[in-house]
Each structure stands twice: as C-alpha cells, then as structure tokens.
C-alpha cells in the first residue's frame, strides 16, 4: 500500500524553519558590531598605553601592540569559526573541555612559568597560555550541560549542588597552588550564577556564602592579604608596592578630568603606573580620554552584556540560554572587578579588562566566547517569518 503524504503540523513546520535558519548561518549583527568596536578601541588604547614600556624594555615601541594584533586576528578567525558550529558540538565537548582545563591546571605547578611571584602560565615556546582562562569557559560549558542533564533534579542537593560544588572546590584548590585569588573569585561567582539559573536550592547559596565568608576571613590573616587590604584602605599613607600602584592609578584617573589629556598624551604610562598596559589599562583610558571617554567605553560594555542576556532570553534551547547567560555573566564580572580595582573600590586583585588588557591567549579566548554567543544567536527564530509560517498554517 502506498503511503499517503501527511501535511506537516505547525510545530513541525516551525522546527523545520528553525533548522533551515540555522543552516543559513545568520548571526546577531548588533552583538557582533559591539564586539568589534570594543576590540578595536581596546587595541588602540593598548598601543597608546604600551609603547613607552616596550621602548623602555629595549624593544620596538609597537612590539606589544603587534603581538596583540596578531592574537586579535587569530581570535577573530576563531570567533567566526565557532559562530558556525551547531550547539550539539558544544554540548558534546562540554565535559571534555572541562577535563582539558583540569589537566592543564595540574601541569601549572609542575612546568608553569613564574612571573611576579606567581606560577600561572605554561610556556609553549612561541606563546604562553593561562589555564585559568580555559577553566572559566569550561565551567560555563560543563555547568550548562550538567544543568540540562539534571533539569528535573536541580532542586536536590545530590544533583543540583554536590557535582557543581565538587568542580568549583577542585578548581579553587588548583588555583590556590598558583596562587590566583582573582580567578578563584571569578570562577566561584560564575558557577554560583549558573547554578542559580539552573534552579539549585537556595540553601546551597546560604551555605556557600557562609563558607566563602569564612575563607575570606582566613585569607585576611595572612600578611600578604592584610597588606593589600591596608593599602586599599589607606593608599596615600601606606608604604608598599601595592599602595604605590593604587596611588598612581588614582593620579591617572584624576588627571584625566572631564575630557582627558588627549589620546597618546598620558604621563603616567612613562614608568610611573605599573601594569599600565595590562590590569591597569583603564586608568590610562581615564587619563587620556577623560570621564567622557571612560563612561562611553563602560556604556559599550553594558550594551554588549545586556545584548548577551537579551539573546539568552530569545534562545529556544535551554543549553543555548545557559551558554549566553554564562558568557555574559563572565564578561560583566571581569569588567566590574577590573574597574573596581583601578578606582580603589575593592582591594587590588589581578583582573584584566576584556578586549583591552594585554594578553594574547586571553584575548583569543574572549573572542572565542563571543563566537559561542553568536552561535547561540543563530538558533533564535526570525519573529516575522515565524508569524508568517503560523498564519499560513492557520
């Protein structure tokens, strides 16, 4: 008997349309434009902030900029490639990326390179990698996959708390060996945010908050930490390298005024402000572009973060929703912490400013994370075409 061809239902038609749209590889243009603007401005500011340091170290004045430009180009290619990958591949590789991150972090104490008293990097010859950066995206991918897997069990401690807490504790232990307090804080906050979105019981956050408060209290008892806290409280009177860095940062911000001293005209970058092209590049931004320029950049970051969360709300897939929220949360945490440090709102910790601070592998991974969000944006159905398809079925 010949099979009669059945008319597809509206839901089947909509599903077919979603697959067709994803195949066409359209992405969210506003999100992409904001990323490109921030990356371009970041490269320009890095060139301005770094040429004095590069010349002082006996290199070409643009050597730091050229190196960052190379990684930016590689990162853009990586972003576009990742934006074309279907979500099924990300979901399949989620736990594998987590295992890779753990393996690399286990290697850091053994073969890692020590810089400024901390062993956080692995030297691969042509460049170095910082496994803690890979750990951040691995937490986003792995937690998103686990939340989808335990969707109906997230309210229980066995499935909604313990597996996630185990991963966070493992990373905290590995980061303590480096040591890397700022990465520990970022990963803990990132994991907590994803657990909250996933539906973990609120009692877990009370226990976790209490445990974190206890660890912070113990941390303040070490002389290294107490020195940083004292420098934060009284930067103008405290005698330490940390206090000196904060003082120079505040001088940079204050001397910029409303409109700044002009692009390239910073005085603090001439060996007065440490890490002027890295963690404290926002101070140079404030000095050269002033309050207006600094606020404009923060608005661009805010628009990018808001757009990321908006895309998350439009994703029809729960895994895509969690990926978008995770990347946007990570971006917001790093921006808030970096700006808070350079303005002395919180004690000094080594947090870089995304797209601005020097660091080739960090920039590549940040652009890769943007590619993941763009990949998720491809799954969002076109509202007008969906309404047309529904009307035709009706």
Image (cartoon, rainbow, N blue to C red):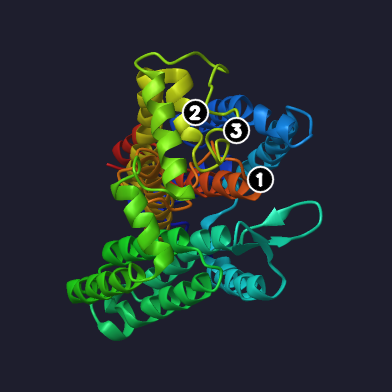
1 or 3: mark nearer the eye: 3
- Point 55% across, 16% down: residue: 265
Residue 315 visible in the picture: no
Residue 305 visible in the picture: yes
- Point 38% across, 69% down: residue: 148
For residue 360, the mark is 1
- Cα separation between marks 1 and 2: 20 Å
Q: In this view, which residue lies farthest toward the right?
A: 125
Q: In this view, which residue lies farthest toward the bottom?
A: 158
- Cα separation between marks 3 and 2: 12 Å
Q: Compared to 388, does 163 lie above or below?
A: below
Q: Compared to 348, does 25 lie above or below?
A: above
1 or 2: mark nearer the eye: 2
Q: Is residue 69 left or right of residue 272?
A: right
- Point 38% across, 40% down: residue: 339
Q: Which residue is mark 2?
A: 284
Q: Compared to 348, does 64 lie above or below?
A: above
Q: Is residue 127 left or right of residue 254?
A: right
- Cα separation between marks 1 and 3: 22 Å
- Point 33% across, 49% down: residue: 232
Q: Secondary structure at mark 1?
A: helix
Q: Which residue is mark 3?
A: 271
Q: Secondary structure at mark 2?
A: helix
């Amino acid at each position: 008997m010949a099979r009669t061809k059945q008319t597809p239902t509206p839901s089947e038609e909509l599903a077919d349309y979603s697959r067709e749209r994803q195949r066409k590889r359209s992405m969210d243009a506003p999100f992409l434009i904001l990323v490109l603007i921030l990356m371009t401005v970041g490269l320009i500011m890095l060139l301005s902030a770094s040429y004095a340091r590069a010349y002082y170290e006996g290199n070409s004045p643009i050597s730091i900029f050229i190196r960052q430009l190379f990684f930016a180009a590689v990162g853009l290619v990586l972003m576009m490639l990742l934006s074309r990958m279907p979500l099924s591949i990300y979901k399949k590789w989620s736990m594998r990326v987590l295992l890779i991150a753990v393996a690399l972090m286990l290697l850091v104490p053994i073969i890692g390179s020590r810089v400024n008293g901390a062993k956080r990097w692995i030297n691969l010859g042509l460049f170095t990698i910082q496994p803690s950066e890979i750990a951040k995206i691995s937490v986003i991918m792995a937690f998103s996959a686990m939340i989808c897997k335990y969707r109906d069990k997230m309210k229980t401690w066995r499935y909604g708390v313990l597996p996630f807490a185990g991963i966070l504790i493992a990373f905290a232990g590995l980061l303590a060996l480096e040591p890397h307090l700022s990465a520990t804080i970022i990963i803990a906050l990132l994991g907590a945010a994803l657990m909250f979105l996933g539906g973990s019981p609120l009692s877990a956050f009370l226990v976790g908050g209490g445990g974190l408060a206890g660890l912070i209290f113990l941390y303040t008892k070490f002389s290294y930490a107490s020195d940083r806290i004292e420098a934060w409280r009284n930067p103008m009177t405290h005698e330490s390298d940390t206090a000196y860095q904060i003082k120079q940062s505040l001088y940079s911000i204050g001397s910029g005024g409303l409109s700044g001293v002009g692009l390239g005209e910073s005085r603090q970058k001439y060996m007065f402000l440490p890490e002027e092209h890295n963690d404290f590049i926002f101070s140079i931004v404030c000095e050269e572009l002033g309050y207006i320029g600094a606020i404009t950049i923060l608005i661009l970051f805010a628009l990018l973060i808001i757009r990321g969360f908006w895309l998350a709300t439009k994703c029809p897939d729960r895994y895509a929703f969690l990926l978008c929220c995770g990347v946007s949360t990570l971006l917001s945490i790093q921006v808030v912490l970096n700006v808070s440090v350079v303005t002395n709102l919180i004690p000094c910790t080594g947090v870089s400013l995304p797209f601005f601070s020097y660091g080739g592998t960090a920039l590549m991974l940040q652009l890769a994370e943007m590619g993941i969000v763009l990949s998720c944006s491809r799954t969002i159905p076109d509202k007008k075409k969906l309404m047309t398809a529904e009307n035709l079925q009706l």
